[in-house]
Image (cartoon, rainbow, N blue to C red):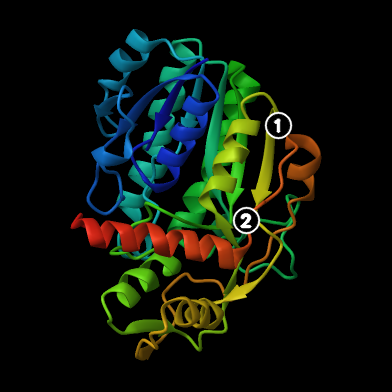
Amino acid sequence: MRIVVTGGAGFIGSHVVDAYLAAGHDVLVIDSLWEHGGGRRVNVPNGVSLVHMDIRDEAMARVFADFSPELVSHHAAQHSVAISSRDPIYDAQVNVVGLLNVLENAVRTGVRKVIFAGSGASFGTPDRLPITDDTAQHPTSPYGITKMVAERYLRFYENEKGLDFTSLRYGNVYGPRQDPNGEAGVISIFIGRFLQQEGVRIDWDGEQTRDYVFVEDVARANLAALERGAGGCYVIGTGIQTSVNRIYRELVEITGFEAPVTHAPPRPGDARAAQFDSARARHELDWSPATRLSDGIRATYEYFKALLASGRPF
């Protein structure tokens, strides 16, 4: 299958590319390599074409026409809750206008399906946990709003233009290649600090929870969605709530270093707790998480430790 992966040089997108390649598919990556987005050329495997392009660029029409993809895995996005709160216009330009540019070109070139990187942020702070696929979406950040709106557009393009889709609403994804210098991804940020023997910042009281899902498990969900999940939206998580304080304790145990802690107020738009029930994904996508948090954190730590030893920047 010929697949375009937007954001395929980024953290999650590059793991999706790896999964598609391992399954024998032909992949083209489109990525803006935005400094705050985590996209890096080194994440793209040898032999895979990388088009350095913003998803809002009109020139995408030529890229789609030349490659003639059968499917698009859309992972390009402005993904930071904090940035979206500071600059909601930019957030909407990338996450909504950029999406529409992708969808228009997908329809124009006969793409069969779009797999969309949705987000648990679209639910905001729900009335009850766990979050299921039927939980009402009440996003509390511009980022979450754009992810919710994007699914409405996907439904419109399905109904009006015959473009199939599957939306995967990720929990907090972590793992190798995540940017430890950015504003998202507490596990990778903490690992970077621990490796450099520096202190960490814990917002709130540290007891806020997220559902942390390992990136390779997420990549498997994207592989499953190639042939399953037509017209569906699926939460992708482990069903386990994990606090920031527990992540800190896990890294202390792994490294033997007790990093100094500075406390800070909650970030604008942050939810207090999250937990996902992925029963529908198990049933309809034949997907379930396979990586324990302690194993995933250790694998991520070893990845960044090796990077540091090699002299490569995080």
Location of residue 8 with respect to 212 vertically, above or below: above
Task: Tell me how far mark 1 sits from mark 2, CA to CA.
Answer: 22 Å
Q: Give the residue type at disc 2.
A: Thr
Q: Is residue 105 above or below residue 243?
A: above
Which secondary structure lies at badge 1?
loop
Looking at the rendered image, the quarter that the C terminus falls into is bottom left
Type of amino acid under label 1: Gly
Residue at 25% from the left image edge and 41% from the top image edge: 33
Q: Position of residue 71 (x, y in %)?
A: 52, 20
Q: Is residue 32 left or right of residue 254?
A: left
Q: Please give the label number shown on residue 229.
A: 1
Left/right placement of residue 188 relative to residue 163 reads left
- Give the quadrant of residue 271: bottom right
- The residue singled out by tag 2 in the image is 291
Residue 189 placed where, x, y %?
36, 69
Image position, residue 204 (x, y; %): 47, 85
**Above-or-below relation of 83 to 191:** above
